[in-house]
Image (cartoon, helix red, strand yellow):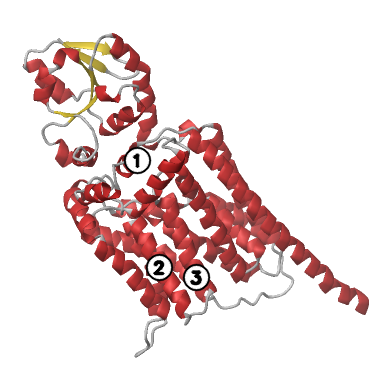
């Protein structure tokens, strides 16, 4: 009997070691899977407006020029990411895959950092759960987009790792923490929110005359310095675009942020609870350990959208769910820590949850691999393909100019057209007060070659122009000016000739 009792801990240790080993192997396999599939998706998607804007700014003649363009402003992001894109363009070209590689690499790196942080706080299986939680969020989309969100996410994960995995009073760790946040803010202005969970955690435990921790002080300096250095860009962009920003601040937007962070979150939560209820049959009371500092800070990442809402309401007027991608590492780590505290004495419960989350993430990724064209922000890719189908016919009709009302379609046509010099954007009346896209493109014309017309320009070139999807009001103005309207195509998109 004593021999059997002595053998049982040995068997449990072997099982634990095997689970830990296979969890690490699974994390590496998943990382490779997401990297390869992300590059495949990137190769089969067109660029859309935001990405093309990034390429236009990054492709300006020199860094001084694009810094000047951002200050005037030609886009709303800080300059560091354009430098990254510029470097990859010079090495690999400006194809769909080449300039999306930084995002793919950053996403995978951030996932592995989150895995390692959770593994250190719990065990390898729960680290794999944290990794799998990320795959069930909206994060995979930003791995195949040419914007700074994946790098922003990676830096947030790295900051959390430094905060949770190093000594609280370590000055080198504090310097590293501040430096990471400094770089993060140069990638995206809303990275200042990365400091919120740590500040709230310290505030909740503050005692009179207690000094802030070295990491918090370094973090404040880390977010404050880039904001001060980039204040001109930030203020100029806010002054011009806050009143017409595409995603205005509202309670409705705030309410939907959390469901957008985890699109299948409620469904997966229901399945996890069902699994726990079916297999969790404790034979003795479970004593929970107190919530650790890292888990508390991770849950406090849920406050980042609330803080962002206040900033947007009071100042920026810009509020979008993707601005809070930095909350994902902390939430994933906190959830894995909670599961470990509650079900750490079981293998079957966390193993089932891990399998459920991993399978859901893989399934979603494979759907996109099969249908990469389904990832179409605001339907812009579909519009571009429609134009490319009729472009040749317009040229055969001897139309020298292709005039666009849609600023997103114009920028995409400019990039993908065989003759971009034929593409022209119409800006007329109160367009600049209603369309932030047209306003940005007008600012960008000072630095990047683009053609902008008014109605007067159209009158001068009416008979040699193909008008793509004209606005009814402006079309009526041309009719009243005596022009005859000939509808060349009514589908797949409306194209009008003027006589």
> In which image quadrant can residue 470 be found?
top left
Q: Nearer the viewer, mark 3 or mark 2?
A: 2
In the image, 211 versus 250, the foreground residue is 211
Crowd band around label 1 with a 10 angstrom C-alpha radius: few (<14), some (14–19), many (20+): many
Look at 30% across and 43% down and name the residue there: 57
Rendered image: mark on residue 162: 3
Task: Give x and y (percent) for residue 357.
Answer: 60, 52
Query: Gap in Å between the C-alphas at discs 3 and 1?
Result: 33 Å
| Label 2 neighbour load within 10 Å: few <14, some 14-19, many 20+ | some
Percent of width and height locating residue 55: 35, 40
**Image quarter (top left, top right, bottom left or bottom right) of the C terminus:** top left
Does residue 227 sit above or below 424 in this rendering? below
Badge 3 local density, few (<14 within 10 Å), some, or many (20+)? some
Classify mark 2: helix, strand or loop.
Answer: helix
Which quadrant: the N terminus? Answer: bottom right
Mark 2 / mark 1, whichever is N-terminal = 1
Say if mark 3 contacts mark 2, CB within 8 Å: no
Query: What mark, if any, has residue 337 been given in the picture?
Result: none
Which residue is found at the position 36% from the left and 27% from the top? Answer: 416
Q: Position of residue 29 (x, y in %)?
A: 65, 50
Residue furthest to the bottom:
209
Marks 2 and 1 in Cβ contact (< 8 Å): no
Q: To which residue does mark 1 refer?
A: 55
Secondary structure type for disc 1: helix
Tell me how far mark 2 sits from mark 1, CA to CA: 27 Å
Residue farthest to the left? 481
In this rendering, position of residue 498 left or right of residue 132 = left
Q: Pointer 2: what residue?
A: 179
Residue appearing at x 14%, y 24% in the figure: 474
Report the mark closest to the observer, 3 or 1.
Answer: 1
């Amino acid at each position: 009997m004593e021999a059997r009792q002595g053998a049982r801990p040995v068997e449990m240790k072997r099982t634990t070691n095997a689970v830990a080993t296979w969890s690490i192997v699974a994390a590496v396999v998943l990382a490779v899977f997401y990297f390869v599939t992300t590059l495949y998706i990137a190769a089969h998607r067109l660029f859309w407006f935001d990405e093309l804007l990034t390429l236009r700014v990054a492709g300006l003649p020199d860094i001084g020029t694009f810094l000047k363009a951002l200050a005037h402003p030609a886009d709303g992001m800080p300059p560091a990411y354009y430098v990254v894109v510029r470097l990859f363009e010079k090495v690999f070209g400006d194809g769909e895959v080449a300039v999306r590689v930084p995002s793919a690499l950053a996403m995978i790196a951030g996932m592995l950092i989150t895995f390692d942080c959770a593994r250190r706080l719990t065990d390898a299986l729960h680290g794999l759960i944290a990794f799998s939680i990320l795959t069930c969020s909206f994060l995979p989309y930003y791995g195949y987009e040419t914007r700074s969100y994946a790098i922003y996410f990676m830096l947030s994960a790295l900051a959390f790792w430094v905060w949770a995995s190093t000594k609280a009073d370590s000055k080198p760790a504090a310097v590293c923490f501040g430096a990471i946040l400094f770089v993060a803010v140069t990638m995206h202005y809303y990275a200042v929110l990365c400091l919120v969970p740590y500040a709230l955690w310290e505030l909740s435990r503050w005692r009179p005359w207690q000094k802030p921790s070295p990491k918090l002080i370094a973090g404040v300096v880390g977010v404050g310095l880039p904001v001060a250095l980039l204040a001109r860009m930030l203020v100029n962009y806010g002054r011009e675009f806050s009143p017409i920003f595409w995603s205005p601040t509202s309670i409705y937007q705030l309410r939907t942020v959390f469901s957008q962070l985890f699109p299948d979150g409620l469904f997966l939560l229901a399945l996890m609870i069902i699994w726990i209820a079916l297999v969790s049959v404790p034979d003795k009371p479970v004593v929970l350990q107190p919530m650790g500092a890292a888990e508390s800070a991770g849950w406090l990442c849920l406050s980042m959208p609330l803080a962002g809402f206040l900033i947007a309401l009071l100042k920026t007027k810009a509020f979008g769910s993707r601005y809070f991608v930095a909350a994902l590492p902390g939430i994933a780590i906190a959830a894995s820590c909670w599961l470990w505290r509650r079900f750490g004495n079981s293998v079957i419960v966390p193993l089932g949850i891990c399998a459920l989350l991993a399978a859901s993430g893989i399934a979603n990724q494979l759907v996109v691999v099969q249908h990469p064209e389904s990832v179409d922000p605001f339907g812009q890719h579909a519009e571009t393909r429609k134009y490319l189908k009729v472009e040749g016919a317009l040229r055969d009709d001897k139309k020298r100019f292709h005039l666009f009302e849609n600023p997103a379609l114009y920028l995409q046509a400019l990039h993908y057209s065989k003759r971009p010099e034929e593409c022209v954007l119409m800006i007329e009346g109160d367009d600049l007060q209603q369309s932030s896209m047209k306003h940005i493109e007008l600012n960008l014309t000072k630095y990047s070659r683009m053609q902008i017309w008014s109605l007067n320009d159209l009158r001068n070139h009416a008979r040699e122009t193909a008008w793509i999807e004209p606005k009814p009001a402006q079309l009526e103005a041309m009719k009243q000016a005596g022009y005859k309207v000939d509808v060349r195509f009514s589908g797949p998109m409306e194209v009008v000739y003027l006589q």
